Image (cartoon, helix red, strand yellow):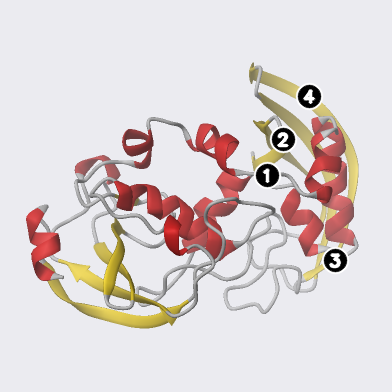
Amino acid sequence: MVALFQTYGWTLDYQISAMNNKLNNINVLTGFNPNAYYFAYNNELSKDVGLDMSGYSNSANIDVKIYRIHESMPQVFYPIQDSRGIVVKKDDKVIGAFISAGRHSAFNACSLRGNSFEKVTGKTIYGWLNGMVRADNIEERLSKLEPEQVIQEYFTALDNKDAKLAGYCISKKALLGNLTLNIQNEELFNEGIWLPLTDSGIGARSSLENLKSTKLLNTELIDEPDKNTKIFRVTVNLQYKKEFTIGSGEQFWDCRMVYETPQTGWKIEGFGH
């Protein structure tokens, strides 16, 4: 293992953790499965050094080791510096290896050659998703909706405590990026899906645990940066059991909508002010 990383200029300081995992379907992505999306994304980085996990899709007993890397992340990731080396093995054979800072974004990762995802694949994340994602029945229905209707679906799902449907309304880029939000160094990714505006506390059993009710009051288009992006001003009434970072009551947010892929349609990329 030391020699593999040294070949590309990385020094393993020490092992942080080891785990036995599984590999879900990384060849065809549907819905949003944290395991499948995490390994499929990082498999592209592994391919940059001739490794490939795709032949082991849907395999159990995958061994994963996380190492502290002596060197910092490439300059492009600054101010993110602390780096980890991730090695994936099956029956003692190395099938994947990549560099990942871990928190706070799964996109703080590169190949052992130091190349970004975009440089390795020659695609944007949405371009890559277009070739990887196959819509299921829920996604097919949502893909036919206008962006305003997707926003309504999201807040209705939150109010109904339907985390699965709410997750379908969020862009896969946002869900993937947040897979390593607040993780510890010894962890690979979060098994749960982070849902915006739920104001769930760290360690919550469910992203909907703290949410009492939501009601969408108004949706207004305020900007259209390009044909695949629309920004809406949404007025909502949000009620929480405890207020961590968001207060309860009527409030407005700017909702960024993106046209993800032809098969999945418009998605919520995030909320801001």
- Residue 27: percent from left, percent from top: 53, 52
- Residue 56: percent from left, percent from top: 44, 64
Counting residues from the N terminus, which is met first, the one under dot 2 or under dot 1?
A: 1
Q: Residues within 10 Å of mark 4 (few under 14, many from 20)?
A: some
Counting residues from the N terminus, which is met first, the one under dot 4 or under dot 1?
A: 1
Q: CA distance from mark 3 to mark 2?
A: 26 Å
Decide which of 110, 203 is in the foreground and name it. Answer: 110
The amino acid type found where label 4 is placed reads: Leu
Counting residues from the N terminus, which is met first, the one under dot 2 or under dot 4?
A: 4
Q: Is residue 117 left or right of residue 263?
A: left
The amino acid type found where label 3 is placed reads: Lys
Report if the CB atoms under discs 2 and 1 are less than 8 Å apart.
yes
Return the residue at label 1. Answer: 134
Q: Residue at x 37, y 41 (%)?
A: 117
Return the residue at label 2. Answer: 263
- Which secondary structure lies at badge 1? loop
Return the residue at label 3. Answer: 161
Q: Residues within 10 Å of mark 1 (few under 14, many from 20)?
A: some
